[in-house]
Image: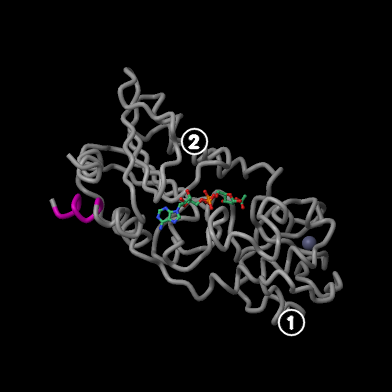
Amino acid sequence: MANSARARELLLSARNLVILTGAGVSAASGVPTFRGPGGLWRHFRSEELATPRAFAGDPSLVWEWYHWRRETVRTKLPNGAHLAIARLQSKPPANLLSAVLVTQNVDGIHPLAGSPCIEMHGSLFRTKCTNSRCPGSSKATEDRRSPIVEALRGRGAPDVEERGPQIPEEELPRCGECGSLTRPAVVWFGENLDPAVMASVQDALQACDLLFVVGTSGLVYPAAGFAEEVQARGGNVVEFNVERTRQDADPSRRGRGAYLFVEGPCEVTVPAVVNAALAR
Ligand code: OAD
Ligand code: ZN
């Protein structure tokens, strides 16, 4: 049986499903992945800019990058993978008691497709205050303005030669409560994930007997460990990716759940599996 048919059978016998997605799920919507082509902004990798240190050293540069990402993403639409996941959540097959979506993406496209979802890494469209004494530092505020501040209008071009003047801190996004500089409400490298968010992810993982891993390179923890965690408990894992990311998966290991790899673009493979399951 082809792996996608086996994936459908697993979906039709599961009780609690968790779907973990990464940048690959939005690739067909035109959002560049982090580690694929188009993953560099100017000459920077995301690991160089998405850090507290980078922001403290050059808030103007980091805000330019986020401004560019916000403006890029706001015009993008859900693709077949987002829509199939949303359909699975809103009209699950009778065997499924729950279908929890956990995304590492900050692009907001799953919510746009109508999916309830746990945004593990936050969102490009929320900000928080950098002043730790301000209540706005512990709660994120939605901000969909375009541009988020006038000083960023026309800035953030990704070309390597691009190097505009630094934007003074007073002209970057500021907190509505205390006037301090705000930052994107996303989780940066070197920062902890929100404990409440992680607790709900852990609850879902503990309960699940099937995990779909869609379009993620599986390099960034804690998400990178989810598949192993589920399999170690005897749960099944299906990975949808254009290339294989896990070499260790040995379906013959006794006492562990199955691991299936469905190769191909997820905007094609995920709807194929979901539609076949929902058609039954
Ligand atoms: P990556 O860019 O590391 O990986 C994207 C994955 O999607 C790769 O494994 C690709 O093979 C796969 N892919 C690309 N196009 C696809 C398609 N059409 N169908 C299926 N798969 C496809 O992105 P993430 O794994 O999401 O963190 O990266 C994880 C985290 O690292 C991000 O959340 C971000 C980043 O730095 C933070 O910002 C904290
Ligand atoms: Zn504040």
Describe the colour scheme in one phrase.
one colour
Q: How many marks?
A: 2
Taking the spot 35% from the left edge, 23% from the top edge, the residue there is: 256
Judge from the rendering whether residue 95 lies leftward or rightward of residue 242; answer left or right: left
Taking the spot 26% from the left edge, 37% from the top edge, the residue there is: 14
Q: Amino acid at mark 2?
A: Gln
Mark 2 or 1: in front is 1
For ligand 2, tell me if the residue under mark 1 lies within 8 Å: no
Of the pair 166 and 128, the residue shown nearer to us: 166
Judge from the rendering whether residue 126 lies leftward or rightward of residue 27; answer left or right: right
Q: Which residues are magenta?
A: 273-279
Residue 12 in the image: x percent, y percent? 21, 42
Q: Which residue is mark 1?
A: 150
Residue 149 in the image: x percent, y percent? 72, 77
Of the pair 239 and 124, the residue shown nearer to us: 239
Residue 57 in the image: x percent, y percent? 85, 57
